[in-house]
Image (cartoon, coloured by chain):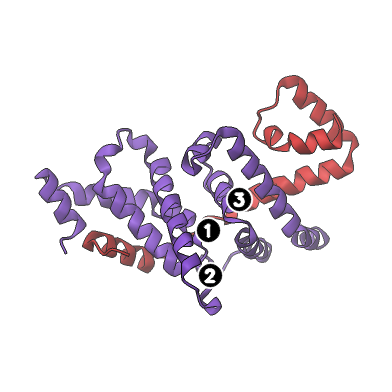
Amino acid sequence: MTCDELAEGLTDFLEGQLSRSETDAALAHLAGCPNCETVLAQTQAVIDAGRLHGRVRLNTEHRAGLLASILDGDSP
Amino acid sequence: MPSVTQRRTDDSGTDDHAADLVALFEAHVDGVYTVAYRIVWNRADADDVAQATFLKAFLNLERLRDRDRARAWLYRIAYREAISVIRRRRDTPVDPADLPEPVDIWTPEAAVEARQLAMALDEAVGQLPVSLRAAFVLRDIEGLPMADVAATLDIGGSAAKMRVHRARAQLRTILQEVFDDLRRAG
């Protein structure tokens, strides 16, 4: 597998959608390619950042105000 | 104007729909608000999108046959509402001072590094084109299966995967400096 092929298949790799042989080829490439290893690590960091920090959590006051507006049927 | 619960009661003759709405709201409000805010990128519009989403959902609750699908169903409504807001915004100039308005999601004890990364992510997601922003929010923030991302965006599975791929790649580039800082600090 080449760097370009790995870059193209990176999402499938991360989503576990590559075949067993494709996964083995990707892992073999990563073991010998520091650049692709960095790209993979940083892409995973982006995903982790999204999952850990991306969600907006409303405070109690905001939640209550929003619910009250909905129950009152206020049209935005 | 009758309240949404009154309208539902008039339609159905029952009065248990307020409890349905509250339960739906409590279970999904943070996710719906996240989809709204991350796409429209300001709090006032996100409030409107979230409000319109739950109003529409409640008035059409009978269309939701499988309650396990409520999250994907609500996100689809929220996405469409958010896109409508963005289209309207194109016709109505917005004061730049109003954008973006950050949502206070921080706890005082949040680790400095986590806070730095999260703030950088806020900025970075806002720099993506809307189509990629939506794909990233649905897949990587909200964790929808790729098939549901495709259904929400009303595109095919390959196109959805490509948008997620491009979003991640662009975010990696935008966040490069932050990653480097964290690595040096680390």
Residue at 29% x, 54% y is B55
Q: Amino acid at mark 2?
A: Pro
Q: Which mark is residue B142?
A: none
User: Which chain is drawn using red?
Assistant: A
C-alpha gap between disc 1 and disc 3: 11 Å
Helix, strand or loop at disc 2?
A: loop
Q: Where does label 1 land, which residue? A: B38
Q: Where does label 3 land, which residue? A: B132
Q: Where does label 2 land, which residue? A: B102
Nearer to us in this view, B88 or A44:
B88
Q: Position of residue B39 (x, y in %)?
A: 52, 57
Q: Position of residue B54 (x, y in %)?
A: 32, 53
Q: Mark 1 belongs to which subunit?
A: B
Helix, strand or loop at disc 1?
A: helix
Q: Position of residue B147 (x, y in %)?
A: 52, 34
C-alpha gap between disc 2 and disc 1: 10 Å
User: Which chain is drawn using purple?
Assistant: B
Instruction: Judge depth for marks 1 and 3 and give the one in front.
Output: 3
Helix, strand or loop at disc 3?
A: helix
